[in-house]
Amino acid sequence: MSVLTRDVILDELDRGRIRIDPLDRSQVGVASIDLTLGREIRQIVDDGTPIRVEDETDYRDHTRVLPLDRPYRLDPGVTIHGITAEHVTLPDDLCGFLEGRSRFARLGLMIHVTSAFVQPGVSNRQVLEMSNVSSRALEIVAGVRICQLVLMRTDGRAVYRGRFQDQREI
């Protein structure tokens, strides 16, 4: 696998093989595409009982969706789900990884806990597992270029058909 650089990403966009909606071409960097935080988050509800982690466990049973119409205070040690404003569509021979941006990582904001992989053939919005690992609260604001998508060619072709293939909301 190899990482796609700006000229290749722009060519793939122009040919319609990669679709990102909405997209301002200034979001395309040297070897990644900046993605922005959408207008809602999902907050884990703490009812005092532990969440049993099993195959059948559904995160939606333990969370609630909140609008991000004003800054959200993300306290140290807390994780929330965000979602990209952009709908990302990849062909069956490209995959990617969501990475945090260093300007926010240096403040203690993690963009994904463990699931950064973007499968080949996806067509959805990307959920972000945002955690504050700093000692100070952070204010999370919609519309910020919060992460970057690094794209790579696959060795072979595949299309993701899993649980989150049509993800449009958190």
Image: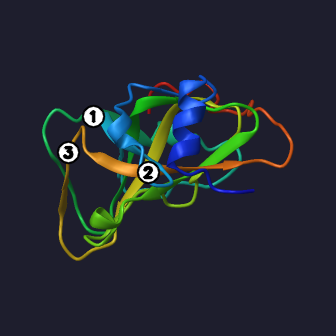
Q: Circle 1 is placed at which residue position?
A: 66
State the scheme by which the image is colored: rainbow
Query: Is 157 located above or below residue 29 in the figure?
Result: above
Q: Residues within 10 Å of mark 1 (few under 14, many from 20)?
A: few
User: For the residue carrying disc 2, how many other residues have a C-alpha within 10 Å: few (<14), some (14-19), or many (20+)?
Assistant: many
Q: Residue at x 33, y 50 (%)?
A: 146
- Which amino acid lies under the numbered mark 2 shown in the image of this protein? Gln
For residue 154, side relative to residue 38 (left or right): right
Q: Judge left or right: residue 100 versus residue 57.
A: left
**Comes first in the chain, label 3 or label 2:** 3
Residue 140: % across, % down: 22, 50
Residue kind at label 3, given as amino acid type: Val
Please state which of the two labelled residues, at mark 3 or mark 2, is closer to the viewer.
2
In the drawing, what numbered circle is on residue 148? 2
In front of the other: 133 or 15? 15
Residue 91, given in percent of the width and then of the height, sits at: 69, 31
